[in-house]
Image (cartoon, helix red, strand yellow):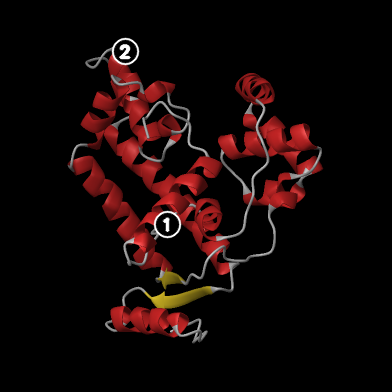
C-alpha cells in the first residue's frame, strides 16, 4: 500500500484471505508472520467488522488534536471498557469510539468467540524477557545504522507525513522528530534537543511496549502453541506441531 494510505484491518482481512486462497490454489500452505494481534485474528478467524463514517471519524480526530487523546480514552472507558483496556494507540481509540457512535454497540461486541475461518495452527515463540529486550534494542540500532533516518527523509518527500498510519509507525514517528529539529537549523543548539540517540531510545521503548501488548494478546489465545525461541530443537518441534495439526491432533501447547 502507498505510504499516504490509511491501514484498515477490514481491508487487510480481505487482501490476506485473497492471498491465502491463491496460495492454496497452487497446492501450497500460506504462512502468516506477525504482528498486530487484531490483524492476525482478522485474517484467521470468523470476524466481521462494522462500517465506517468518515464524518464521525474526522470529528473524533479533531477532538483528539484539540483536547488530547486522553479525553477520548476516558470516554471509551465509559462506553466500552473492554476495548479501552485492549487498545492503546490513538487511531484504534478513535475507531472504537466511531463504531460505538455509528452502531450504538461497543466495538468489543463485534469480537466473537475464537473460531478459525479455515483450519490453521498458530505458533508462538517464547523468550526470556531480558534477552528479548536486548534483541529489540539491537534491532533498532541496526535499523539506524542501515540508514533509517535517510529512509524517513526520502519517504517524507513522497508524502509520509500525510499518511495517518505510516507517519505514526514505530520508528518512522520518532525519526520524523529528528528531521523536524534538523529542519529548524542543523547547526543551532536546538538540533541537540532531540537527537538520533533520542530517536533510537524512544523507538526501542515503543517497540518494547508493542511487544508486551503482543505477548498479552497471544497469551490470551489458548490455541497458540508456544516454543522456546532459542531451543536447538525449535524447527523440529514446530514442524511436528504442524504435522499433528494437519492430522487433526492438538498436540502440546508448550515445549
Q: Measuring from the top left, give residue 208's x and y in whole percent.
A: 44, 53
Q: Quadrant of the N terminus?
A: top left
Secondary structure beneath label 1 = helix
User: Residue pushed farthest front?
Assistant: 25
The answer to which image quadrant residue 125 occupies is bottom left
> Can residue 192 be seen here?
yes
Q: Residues within 10 Å of mark 2 (few under 14, many from 20)?
A: few
> Can you name the residue that lies furthest to the left here?
146
Mark 1 vs mark 2: which is more N-terminal? 1
Picture residue at 33% right of the left edge, 18% below the top: 190
Q: Residue at x 27, y 82 (%)?
A: 232
Which quarter of the figure is the C terminus placed in?
Answer: bottom left
Specify whether 194 is left or right of 14.
left
Q: Within the image, what quadrant is residue 90 found in?
A: top right
The image shows residue 64, relative to residue 90, as above or below, that is above
Q: How many marks?
A: 2
Q: In percent of the image, x 30 and y 47: which residue is there?
A: 140
Please state which of the two labelled residues, at mark 1 or mark 2, is closer to the viewer. Answer: 1
Q: Which residue is mark 1?
A: 21
Q: Position of residue 235 (x, y in %)?
A: 29, 78
Provide the secondary structure element on which disc 2 rests: helix
Q: Which mark is residue 184?
A: 2
- Give the label on residue 147, or none: none
Amino acid at each position: 500500500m502507498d505510504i499516504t494510505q490509511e491501514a484498515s484491518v477490514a481491508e487487510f482481512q480481505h487482501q490476506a484471505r485473497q492471498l491465502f486462497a491463491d496460495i492454496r490454489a497452487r497446492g501450497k500452505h500460506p504462512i502468516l508472520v506477525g504482528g498486530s494481534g487484531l490483524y492476525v485474528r482478522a485474517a484467521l478467524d470468523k470476524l466481521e467488522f462494522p462500517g465506517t463514517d468518515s464524518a464521525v471519524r474526522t470529528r473524533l480526530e479533531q477532538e483528539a488534536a484539540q483536547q488530547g487523546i486522553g479525553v477520548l480514552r476516558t470516554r471509551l472507558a465509559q462506553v466500552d471498557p473492554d476495548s479501552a483496556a485492549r487498545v492503546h494507540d490513538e487511531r484504534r481509540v478513535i475507531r472504537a469510539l466511531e463504531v460505538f457512535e455509528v452502531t450504538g454497540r461497543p466495538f468489543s461486541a463485534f469480537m466473537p468467540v475464537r473460531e478459525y475461518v479455515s483450519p490453521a495452527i498458530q505458533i508462538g515463540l517464547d523468550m526470556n524477557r531480558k534477552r528479548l529486550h536486548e534483541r529489540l534494542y539491537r534491532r533498532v540500532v541496526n535499523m539506524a545504522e542501515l540508514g533509517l533516518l535517510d529512509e524517513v527523509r526520502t519517504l517524507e518527500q513522497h508524502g509520509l507525513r500525510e499518511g495517518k498510519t505510516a507517519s505514526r509507525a514505530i520508528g518512522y514517528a520518532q525519526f520524523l522528530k529528528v528531521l523536524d529539529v534538523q529542519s529548524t537549523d542543523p547547526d543551532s543548539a536546538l538540533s541537540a534537543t532531540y537527537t538520533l540517540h533520542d530517536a533510537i531510545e524512544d523507538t526501542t521503548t515503543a517497540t518494547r511496549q508493542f511487544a508486551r501488548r503482543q505477548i498479552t494478546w497471544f497469551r490470551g489465545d489458548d490455541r497458540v502453541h508456544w516454543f522456546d525461541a532459542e531451543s536447538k530443537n525449535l524447527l523440529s518441534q514446530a514442524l511436528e506441531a504442524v504435522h499433528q495439526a494437519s492430522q487433526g491432533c492438538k498436540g502440546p501447547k508448550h515445549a
